[in-house]
Amino acid sequence: MSKPRLFSTLQCLRHENPLGLPRSGAPPQLPGMQRGLPKKRPIPSVRKTIAVSSAKGGVGKSTIAVNLALAFAGAGHRTGILDTDIFGPSIPTLLALSGEPRLSEKNQLLPLTNYGVKSMSMGYLVGEEAPVVWRGLMVMKALQQLLWEVDWGGLDVLVMDLPPGTGDTQLTITQQVVLDGAIVVSTPQDIALKDAVKGVEMMRKVNVPLLGMVQNMSVFTCPNCSHSTHIFGSKGVAKACEKHNVPFLGDIPLHASICDDADRGKPTVMADPEGSRAKAFSTIAERIAMKIGLES
């Protein structure tokens, strides 16, 4: 007669997914979420709001976001840019701005302005070299303040510079804010495109209109011999757009001056407004404006 087993592995083997993670990649439906998500609402005193995403760090998303904002402003639109990257804000450097924002009579943050573009960023609220070492709850509280406690004073368009990835910040924004569309930035190589496609699919899952993809660092032209080289590949983003049925908004070249302009706080659209690189940004901004109904 065999002795009864003290434990069984049968129950463990049945649980292939013990954490209950969603197999489709959709956000998990927690009990609080099943009772209903918060209703989306527009950013106060803002007519149009667009999100610039990448899902991959280091592809030049913030540089493109700020140049698009400057191109909108150059076309006569009242424009703002909101830096939603709590841990690695870039907008203060890109716009050569610093200092703590003042408060309005209604106790709201007043944006800092340069080149005719209003801006708000976590970088204005902490020291330039101070790390933001916060857990999720504090990050979400800071994000809520940036979203709902800024007095924009009336804008035609607000550009939201999203952090890399498809996590809490992106989910909060897409579930709480009425977005007129999203742009996904990528470089042509496969390692960036794999994450960019995840960004595209996230926007679809949360029902945010996809305005299109932008291919950054598309071609390098030698300043000495004028020979053009596709360092990261030539048509990676265009092919991904065709495969996933996403509009292709255009190319931004790989050029040292774009990086230099960004580092010194005078982005290309302002530094060389008549140059070919600034015109590339302006052309993409015009296409976006048409898609979201931003009148000239």
Image (tube, rainbow, N blue to C red):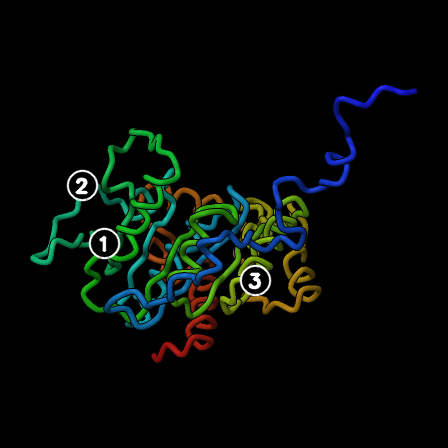
- Residue occupying image coordinates x 64% and y 46%: 232
Element carrying mark 1:
strand
Asked whether residue 164 appears in the rendered view, the answer is yes
**Circle 2 residue:** 99
- Labels 2 and 3: the sequence-earlier one: 2
Could you tell me the amino acid type at mark 3?
Answer: Lys
Which quadrant of the view contains residue 78? bottom left
**Circle 1 residue:** 114
Position in image of residue 250 (x %, y %): 55, 64
Q: Are marks 2 and 3 in contact (CB under 8 Å)?
A: no
Outermost residue toward the front in this view: 1
The one nearer the camera, 21 or 228, is: 21
Position in image of residue 163 (x %, y %): 44, 47
Dot 2 alpha-carbon crowd within 10 angstroms: few under 14, some 14 to 19, many 20 or more: few
Could you tell me the amino acid type at mark 2?
Answer: Gly
| Spatial separation of the CA atoms under disc 3 and disc 1 | 35 Å
- Residue occupying image coordinates x 64% and y 64%: 241
Q: Where's the N terminus, which quadrant?
A: top right
Discs 2/1, front: 2
Which quadrant of the view contains residue 77? bottom left
Could you tell me the amino acid type at mark 1?
Answer: Asn
Element carrying mark 3:
helix
Discs 3/1, front: 3
- Residue occupying image coordinates x 10% and y 58%: 106
User: Which label number is shown at residue 96?
Assistant: none
Position in image of residue 172 (x %, y %): 41, 54
**Circle 3 residue:** 205
- Labels 2 and 1: the sequence-earlier one: 2
The one nearer the camera, 86 or 215, is: 86
| Spatial separation of the CA atoms under disc 2 and disc 3 | 38 Å
Q: Is residue 38 left or right of residue 26?
A: left
The one nearer the camera, 31 or 150, is: 31
